[in-house]
Amino acid sequence: MELRTLRAFVEVVRQGGFSEAAKVVFTTQSAVSKAVRQLEDELGLPLLNRIGHRTTLTDAGEVVYRRALTILAGRDDLIAELAELRGLSRGTLRLGLPPIGNDVLFAPLFAVFRSRYPGIEIKLVEQGAKRLEEMVLSGEVDLGVSLLPVPEAFEWQSVRREPIHVLLPSGHLLEGRKTVQLAELKDNPFILFESGFALNSVILGACRTAGFEPEIVARSSQINFIIELVAAGLGAGFLPRMIAEQRSRAGVSNALVVEPSMEWHMAWIWRRGGYLSHAARAWLDLAGSEPSSKS
């Protein structure tokens, strides 16, 4: 089994087809198809269901895909560690950030890091927390940001803890309250973030603790759009206190959610037992020393 065949197979799955995978691995579509067939022949099992131009994973393909991500991430770790042993001071730091809280929490860090380590290039990816966890495990990013608790596969360093506030439109029965019990919102439609945002799990888990399943009328990945939907009276939205106060808008009030309380606990994550480059360790050291990153 060769790494190049595993890489081709993984990219077919990631990109959703052979032609797009070929662009990523800089070869032809026929070469990618041949590599995947070679892998299937070697393992003696079909890995992909080919339906027209679409491909989906078989049960065996699911297993191989998960293992291939681990193998390829280990190979990247090996190359990075050996490069540093050879004294290569320049490099790349790949960071995965969520769309929530970036401007307040992380923007100041970039300027400080750049001034201290001008030879390190920072590459940023913005995704929801669940997707970032996948990217950390696969080695696509060195460090990502997620909400605690995270699976045992990760180690983590706290960034920030904030209670959750509910956003309510002008004229709402609960307008003007400083605190709101979650059960008082059970008859209100909810506006949540897109699937893949870990904050959704925090909100929905608290609702189940309070004894109800909310009606979800809209989802968005954009904070400002969620606020505008609340202002239009479509439903109630939710944001960490820090962001709710920062994004105040006429016609929208916010109140602390209590009983049960909800917490947005953001943390840097990396693979447990995985190799951390000097650049990644330097970033964690800097993030841990900045006042805005304390929990």
Image (tube, grey):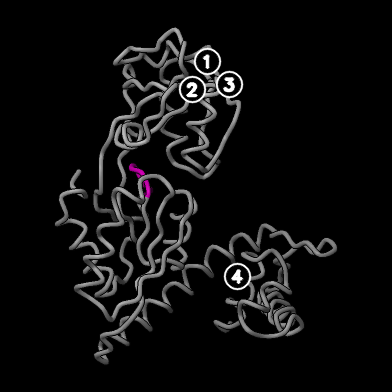
Badge number at residue 188 = 1
**In the rendered view of the protein, which quadrant contains the N terminus?**
bottom right
Q: Is residue 95 left or right of residue 287?
A: right
Task: Point out the residue furthest to the right here.
Answer: 52
Question: Residue at the spot x=28%, y=74% of the render?
Answer: 277
User: Which residue is located at x 30 percent, y 57 percent?
Assistant: 107
Seen from the viewer's position, the closer of residues 251 and 182 is: 251
Q: Quote the CA–CA distance across marks 1 and 4.
A: 43 Å
Q: What residue lies at 43% left-to-right and 10% top-to-bottom? A: 184
Q: CA distance from mark 2 to mark 4?
A: 40 Å
Task: Please say whether residue 41 is one of the residues in the magenta stretch.
Answer: no
Kindly state the secondary structure of the residue where label 3 is placed. Answer: loop
Mark drawn on residue 236: 2
Q: Is residue 49 above or below residue 233?
A: below
* Precedes in sequence: disc 2 or disc 3: 3
Identified by mark 3, the residue type is Glu
Tell me which label, 1 or 2, sits earlier in the chain.
1
Prevalent SS, magenta region: loop
Residue where numbered disc 3 is placed: 215
Cα separation, mark 1 vs mark 2, equals 7 Å
Specify whether 277 is left or right of 95.
left
Residues at marks 2 and 3, CA–CA distance in whole angstroms: 10 Å
The three-letter code of the residue at mark 1 reads Asn
Which is nearer the eye, 31 or 6? 31
- Given the image, on which type of amino acid does mark 2 rest? Ala
From the image, tell me which residue sits under label 4. Answer: 10
- Say which quadrant the C terminus sits in: top left
Ranked by sequence position, the earlier of labels 2 and 4 is 4
Q: Which residues are magenta?
A: 146-151
